[in-house]
């Protein structure tokens, strides 16, 4: 935890996904100070007929950032801006086509290796 869950139009190359995962991990580490070994980045490739906004087909990317509760609003906003900018830069996508959100979970309800995670660093 954090888990950065990217729902994107199918077609990104393995190289692009690898670069996104590396750079998003770096941004998450820099902004909210999570240990690198706790940061996961996932991709869900969606076919063209599976993404709509306002009832119209779109090629938007939706990025869900799941983090432990306890970061400041400023840190969360910095995280969203950094992830959006990273995605736009690497995929050559307009940020108008990227939507992000953060969901926060109490650390006591997050497990890794069967053990609860510690409270997050204060940022």
Image (cartoon, helix red, strand yellow):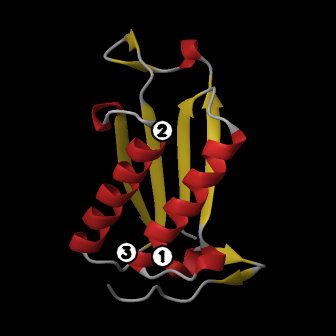
Spatial CA span between label 1 and label 2? 21 Å
For the N terminus, the quadrant is: bottom right
Location of residue 61 by image quarter: top left
Residue 90, given in percent of the width and then of the height, sits at 47, 45
Q: Are marks 1 and 3 in contact (CB under 8 Å)?
A: yes
Location of residue 31 by image quarter: bottom left
Residue 29 relative to residue 49: left or right: left
Q: Quick check: 86 above or below 57?
A: below
Q: Which residue is pictured at 46% across the width and 57% down the height? A: 65
Q: Which residue is pictured at 26% across the width and 77% down the height? A: 72
Between 112 and 27, the residue placed more toward the observer is 27
User: If you read the primary sequence from the N terminus, does the residue marked by circle 1 or circle 2 appear first?
Assistant: 1
Circle 3 Cα neighbour tier, 10 Å, few/some/many (<14 / 14–19 / ≥20) = some
Spatial CA span between label 1 and label 3? 6 Å
Q: Which residue is pictured at 67% across the width and 76% down the height? A: 111
The residue labelled by disc 3 is 31
Residue 114 relative to residue 80: left or right: right
Tag in front: 1 or 2: 2
Q: Which residue is pictured at 21% across the width and 72% down the height? A: 74
Circle 2 Cα neighbour tier, 10 Å, few/some/many (<14 / 14–19 / ≥20) = few
| Local SS, label 1 | helix
| Local SS, label 2 | helix
Name the outermost residue toward the left.
Answer: 74
Residue 29 relative to residue 110: left or right: left
Residue 85, given in percent of the width and then of the height, sits at 34, 51
Residue 4, given in percent of the width and then of the height, sits at 53, 56
The residue labelled by disc 1 is 29
The residue labelled by disc 2 is 91
User: If you read the primary sequence from the N terminus, does the residue marked by circle 2 or circle 3 appear first?
Assistant: 3
Residue 94 relative to residue 62: left or right: left
Location of residue 25 by image quarter: bottom right
């Amino acid at each position: 935890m954090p888990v950065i869950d990217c729902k994107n139009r199918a077609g990104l190359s393995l190289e692009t996904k690898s670069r996104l995962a590396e750079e998003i991990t770096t941004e998450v580490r820099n902004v909210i100070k999570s240990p690198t070994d706790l940061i996961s980045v996932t991709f869900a490739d969606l076919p063209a007929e599976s993404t709509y906004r306002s009832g119209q087909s779109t090629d938007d990317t939706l990025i869900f950032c799941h983090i432990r509760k306890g970061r400041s609003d400023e840190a969360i906003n910095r995280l969203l801006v950094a992830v959006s900018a990273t995605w736009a830069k690497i995929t050559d996508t307009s940020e108008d086509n990227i939507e992000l959100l953060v969901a926060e979970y109490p650390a006591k309800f997050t497990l890794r290796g069967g053990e609860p995670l510690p409270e997050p660093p204060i940022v």
